[in-house]
Image (cartoon, helix red, strand yellow):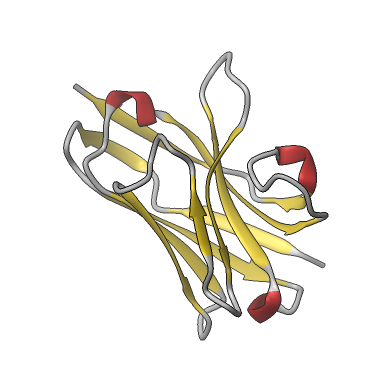
Amino acid sequence: QVQLAESGGGSAQAGGSLRLSCAASGFVYSDHWMAWFRQAPGKKREGVATIHTGVGSTLYSDSVQGRFTISPDNVKNTVYLQMNNLKPEDTSMYYCATQTVGGDWRRPENYNYWGQGTQVTVSS
């Protein structure tokens, strides 16, 4: 049974940092795309970053490029999202997803499994 568990959310001031974690289990972690999404109230869920845990390839949305870094820990079966220089517009619920069916990595309908999410709130 595939399970994803996010942690590390919380509150930060603009310009600050947070690190999110996504612990994965129930599948062959080392050969999958793992992605982080976020969704603010009243807005669509959007892709933030993705990484292939085997090859290490990464992709980022334009809104976080240069500020966020996605990385894997293949011993702990965990993917991290290091978020630096946070902005109030980064305030969202952040979700981890895996097992993409292909297509645009930024589209949530292209993923089979999701975590429950962790809230990030950035104040100005």
Placement of 89 over or under 55, stated as above or below:
above
Image coordinates of residue 40 in percent, x first then y, are 51, 23
Among the 4 quarters of the image, the one containing residue 31: bottom right
Placement of 15 over or under 29, stated as above or below:
above
Q: State the residue lying farthest toward the top.
A: 42
Residue drawn at point x = 58 percent, y = 18 percent: 43
Image coordinates of residue 4 in percent, x first then y, are 65, 59
Image coordinates of residue 92 in percent, x first then y, are 46, 30
Residue drawn at point x = 29 percent, y = 24 percent: 88
Residue drawn at point x = 37 percent, y = 45 percent: 65
Residue drawn at point x = 43 percent, y = 38 percent: 62
Left or right: 32 as drawn, with respect to 19? right
Observer-nearest of 16 and 54: 54
Label total for image:
0
Image quarter hosting the N terminus: bottom right
Observer-nearest of 72 and 52: 52
Among the 4 quarters of the image, the one containing residue 11: top left
Placement of 53 over or under 6, stated as above or below:
below
Image quarter hosting the C terminus: top left
Among the 4 quarters of the image, the one containing residue 15: top left
Image coordinates of residue 110 in percent, x first then y, are 78, 46
